[in-house]
Image (spheres, grey):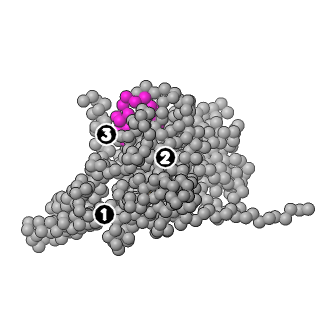
Amino acid sequence: MIVYALMKYIEKIPVRYDRMMNLLTLGCHARAHEMMRSEIEPGMSVLDIGCGTGRFALAAAAKGARVLGVDSSPEMLRVFRENLLARPDLQARVEILECGAGSIGHLLGERRFDRITASLMLGELPDLVRARTIASAATLLAPGGKVVVCDEFWPKSRWMSALYHLLFWIFFVPNFILTRTLIQPVRGFERDVDLAGLSVVARRELLLGAMAVVCLVRSGE
Amino acid sequence: MTPQELRDLVIGVRCVVLRYNPIRFPVGLLSSGRPDATSPVGVSGNYFRTVQRLRKTLRGIDCHILVADSAGINVWCAAGVCDFNEHKIADAVHATGLATVVSHRRLILPQLAAVGVDLARLRAESGFSGTWGPARLEDLPVLLRGDGRVAGAMRLVRFPLADRFHNAVGLFDVFLLLPLALLIFLGTGAAAFALLANALVIFPLFLGYPLFPCRYPANSALIWGLVVTAAVALGGLALAPGSATVWVSVGTTLLAALLVAIDMLGSTPFYKTTIAHWLATGDNRSLFQPLVLDRCTGCGACEAVCPKGIFSLGTADGRGRRAVANLDAECCECLACLKQCPREAIANVHGALFKDDIKSVPDVARLVLGEPQAPPHRAIAREEPE
Ligand SMILES: C[S@@+](CC[C@H](N)C(=O)[O-])C[C@H]1O[C@@H](n2cnc3c(N)ncnc32)[C@H](O)[C@@H]1O
Ligand code: SF4
Ligand code: SF4
């Protein structure tokens, strides 16, 4: 029964998703998106990986960019499509593709993007898939392009790390109920970025460093 | 016992005891035996215990095991809520570089994932074709050794004692919330009573399920729950007559019994039905009953994925080969047949009336009615400038 109640609740999640996310991150979700949006300029081509309900993709399109949103969840994309229907002015500039983040390199082949964004999604990926996704992003980047990531990052200090472990145990239940997935702060990001041939050019922290918006470019550019 | 075995045991117990806080096995490619480029590839979800069992079952058989993300839970549940689908498998294929490891392009998929996996899209996204393996991983060796194919009983889902035990432990864990609440508000006596009552409601029911006389498990649960509640009431009155604790205990036992009965309406491999339908009729059977339409071409996709053995292929009334649904068998409304039928040739005998808790079948509302796809919107002819 409890499981049933949970399912019922989750069923409605994509619709309430945006509000819930903002609440969970104490309003930082919106601020992070604002920071990411400042990297977008009219006419740019943008790939938003794990676009979810399309909140960021639509904001980027509203700024005049052409956006391809990619997500593996048909439920999230259903809400995205509904949101897009409400914005006829943006429809010509927004494209949606249902696929896994690990498959973008395979499916998008020769396409190139000026900005590749991933907001609060890398933490949902298993380590190997995350590494592959970041590597694919590096190949799909147009010359002079930027990868912009917003996520929670696992702290480096040992005390903070222990505290995080504890918090995750305590918050397991509400976290699971609210988001269904076990969103975890991203670990091993530096190594993935390094292996993909990218380098960090900017990093802005939110929520006392628990969240950050990170800009990456191809190393040597 | 080797350290590895001890570790596996500890993790196995941890998985069962804390069932709803699952451990995820890392997504990746594992080797069983000494596989080479031509060895078969079996796909698994990433519930830790499943991968453990799989490795044990396949010991000595040369094959690759591709572990894909199923959110750390079993593929049947994960597939129904879009947590295990073609995208997650394709992610694993690309992340592991499987195409450079094997020379063939075939994946053996867990049959119970059929409700979530679109095979055509899997091929397009990963470059690999999927075929359905057996329902239970214990039957995989037969297929992998090449001694046989998946057919008949290998496609049926069961609910063996071990699984029932794990299910009971999971439910017991969830129901610990009740005694915990009592502990805080009413003290240890009431909490201990509630704990005992929970155990008495849940364990005998799941473990002794085949012994219960009722045809439908939800009814067994309710009747057994009432028996335990009566016992708690009598025991409580004898031990501490007039105490409020007794009545609270009776209440919580009754509540536990009801919740367990409701759990039997779709959270186990049994039938699946709505609470309202069960309460009104006492009938636990699924409201979904497959109706094979004339569009059927007899491809056999439904037969290959149905975990209840509902379909067989026949040549009814000279109309050529087509699927025949045996409605006496017990459909569990998993909707795997609906997801996999390439002709949209399966509808529901009861139309729109079904539990409808599966999220991974697009257009399910239309499919159950047997309606053909709406014709594409006719483009409004635009006047071309002369
Ligand atoms: C927490 S949401 C973030 C959504 C959006 N970017 C935002 O900032 O609001 C994470 C999204 O990642 C998607 N996702 C998770 N795993 C994925 C995968 N393997 N491939 C593609 N998308 C994935 C989920 O479906 C979900 O929509
Ligand atoms: S899957 Fe569809 S078309 Fe194929 S046999 Fe079954 S009902 Fe017929
Ligand atoms: S007939 Fe019932 S049990 Fe069989 S696949 Fe279809 S929904 Fe599942």
Three-letter residue code for mark 3: Ile
Q: In what quadrant of the picture does the C terminus of chain B appear?
A: bottom right
Q: Are marks 3 and 2 in contact (CB under 8 Å)?
A: no
> Under tag 2, what secondary structure?
helix
Q: Is residue B56 above or below residue B264?
A: above
Q: Disc 1 designates what residue?
A: B216
Q: Disc 2 designates what residue?
A: A124
Three-letter residue code for mark 1: Tyr
Q: Is residue B329 left or right of residue B107?
A: left
Q: Residues under labels 3 and 2: Cα distance?
A: 23 Å
Q: In what quadrant of the picture does the N terminus of chain B appear?
A: top left
Residue depth check, mark 1 versus mark 3: number of the one nearer the observer: 1
Q: Is residue B159 left or right of residue A154?
A: left
Specify whether tag 2 is near ligand 1 (CB below 8 Å): yes
The structure residue drawn at horizontal position 43% and vertical position 25%, both measured from the top left corner, is B34
- What range of the chain is rendered magenta? B50-67
Q: Disc 3 designates what residue?
A: B11
Residue B111, horizontal then vertical, whole percent: 44, 46
Indicate whether residue B376 is drawn in magenta. Answer: no
Name the chain under label 1: B
> Under tag 3, what secondary structure?
helix
Specify whether tag 3 is near ligand 1 (CB below 8 Å): no
Tell if the residue under mark 3 belongs to the same chain as the one under mark 2. Answer: no
Q: Are marks 2 and 1 in contact (CB under 8 Å)?
A: no
For mark 2, does the 10 Å Cα neighbourhood hold few (<14), some (14 to 19), or many (20 or more) residues?
some
Three-letter residue code for mark 2: Glu
Q: Is residue B88 above or below residue A135?
A: below
Residue B169, horizontal then vertical, whole percent: 27, 52
